[in-house]
Image (cartoon, rainbow, N blue to C red):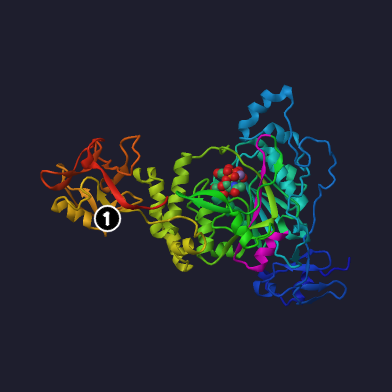
Amino acid sequence: EDVPNVNSVTKTLGLNDPTKQAILTEGPELIKVLNVSLADKDQLRKINRSSKTVRFTRDTGMHKVLTVDATLSPRDPKAPGQFGHPAAVPDDKQEEAKHRWKEGNFNVYLSDLIPVDRAIDDTRPAGCSDQLVHNDLPTTTIIMCFVDEVWSTLLRSVHSVLNRSPSHLITEIILVDDFSTKEYLKDSLDKYMLQFPKVQILHLKERHGLIRARLAGAELAKGDVLTFLDSHVECNVGWLEPLLERVRLNRKKVACPVIEVISDKDMSYMTVDNFQRGIFTWPMNFGWRQIPPEVIEKNKIKETDIIRCPVMAGGLFSIDKKYFFELGTYDPGLDVWGGENMEISFKVWMCGGEIEIIPCSRVGHIFRNDNPYSFPKDRIKTVERNLARVAEVWLDEYKELFYGHGYHLIQKNLDVGDLTQQIELRKKLRCKSFKWYLENIYPDLEAPLVKASGLVCELYKCKYVTNACLHFCNQKFNYTWLRLIKHGDFCVAAVDAKGTLGLYPCDNRNNSLKWLHKSLVAFQTELMDHLVLEHLQQPTCLEVDRSHKTLRVNACDASNPYQKWQFGNYYAE
Ligand code: UD2
Ligand code: MN
């Protein structure tokens, strides 16, 4: 074919700098020049085949989302699980299936039974297949990390990308093997993937955890956009272009597909409810929340409309590569699993970007009840530490809500490691405050900084009691998420062994300042509760001392009315 070669194009482009080398790939009508220097790249690049000349005209045309699907007429339509239908374990294989469950914490037996390139239903809302996307979409590198992934599931993930993506948009698929122990993930995998030149495998020499494994993949990526996927997914038809379209529109948009469900039990591919946002509740647990029907109605939100999300689920998204690095990638101090979705979400929103769910892009994922791989350290501790790093860097004063809700955290002198670089980064990027994020991006999250305010002692409502009590109660005391009874910067504490009370400078980490506001009687219905000092050997309660007309602490006694306290206001959790 009469096609200009790399050298001639490089010359025509006036690129004699080898770092600006041009590489040719073929599109339907045009040949794109990729990997040219950034300045040149923003202008586009239409090459006239016959004249071998390069014209810098930006191809701003659009086309209907391509219906690339090599599985449309599967070779074995009767195979189990075909078309995403549920598969069943034969009666005589029940034991085997049960036994193999723990290999992946899903029905591994069935996964092995169904074709690695099975067809699935097009679950996109009506209208998606008619949407237009630009002809000059950015290219992408797919990054899929795994540790000890089930063979058939990993293969199905890769096949789904290859079979249902326009190949000119995929620069490469990087499989990052996070130091798996299974033999088949070594030579056999390498050998299998040789048939797909776009697939590269990076075998890590030690366990990185998914966060640092993704970063290792990102370092190698040559595409314009990074698209991260889990290793047990099935990309549906038309999934890729709508994601890239958003990034093309604005490089600070981070685009997530709708995550559909591949059943862990029967491997069926199931669609999910529309209008779901990614949200979190304290202490930073990810969740989905339906947009209320009245909001949908009032704003005339359509099924195909893009949904802005306070946080992303974590596993599946496209992000402009350069932007990802500008943001400082993930905090590389995050270990193994968990919390990185919060980190990237806060970072993106607070530093000028957006997180979106694109309803016309759909990818199935096997949700499992438990991680099927080992954690080098305790799982719960690992996730807590990751979240604490995120809280320390991004949550400002609101980190108290995180610690307060995850009360157990503060007790064990959690070592979050060095955060200097992360804090520097936030400064350098001039990111907005968490308060801004809450007010503008996630206004429906209840995030009151104090848990309760206005301390009142029950019996005398203070007004009638002693000077000390009066003095005490007239001051404004707040009860915080960290269980401090706070007056300005001072906190109520027992100052000596006799239980004399006084005000101490507050210190979030000092457990002897912490009061537990709780009901000591299970059947108690009113809000009158004890305020208990827990750090002492015996629980000790705040009490009004009638004879000495003072406040003190004393052994807790559920029936003692002088130990009952109330706050004027309680704030929602
Ligand atoms: C969700 C995300 C997941 C990640 C996680 C929080 C989705 C669909 N999934 O949990 O991507 O954001 O929340 O951290 O949104 N892996 C490694 N090395 C490890 C551990 C895991 O490579 O040390 C791989 C693993 O094989 C998998 C991916 O990382 O492909 C995500 O792990 P997961 O599937 O156990 O996480 P998931 O889906 O429960
Ligand atoms: Mn997963």
The amino acid marked with disc number 1 is Phe
In the rendered structure, the answer to whether residue 82 lies left or right of residue 183 reads: right
- The residue positioned farthest toward the top in the image shown: 92
In the rendered structure, the answer to whether residue 363 lies left or right of residue 440 reads: right
Residue 382 visible from this viewpoint: yes
Write down the residue under mark 1: 477
Residue 72 percent across, percent down from the top left? 83, 48
Residue 92 percent across, percent down from the top left? 73, 22
The stretch drawn in magenta includes residue 242: yes
The stretch drawn in magenta includes residue 486: no
The residue range painted magenta reads: 241-265
Residue 187 falls in image quadrant: top right
Label 1: element kind = loop
Q: Does the residue labelled 1 lie within 8 Å of ligand 1?
A: no
Taking 369 as reference, is 337 above or below it? Answer: below
In the image, what residue occupies the spot 71% across and 39% down?
Answer: 268
In the image, what residue occupies the spot 41% across and 47% down?
Answer: 405
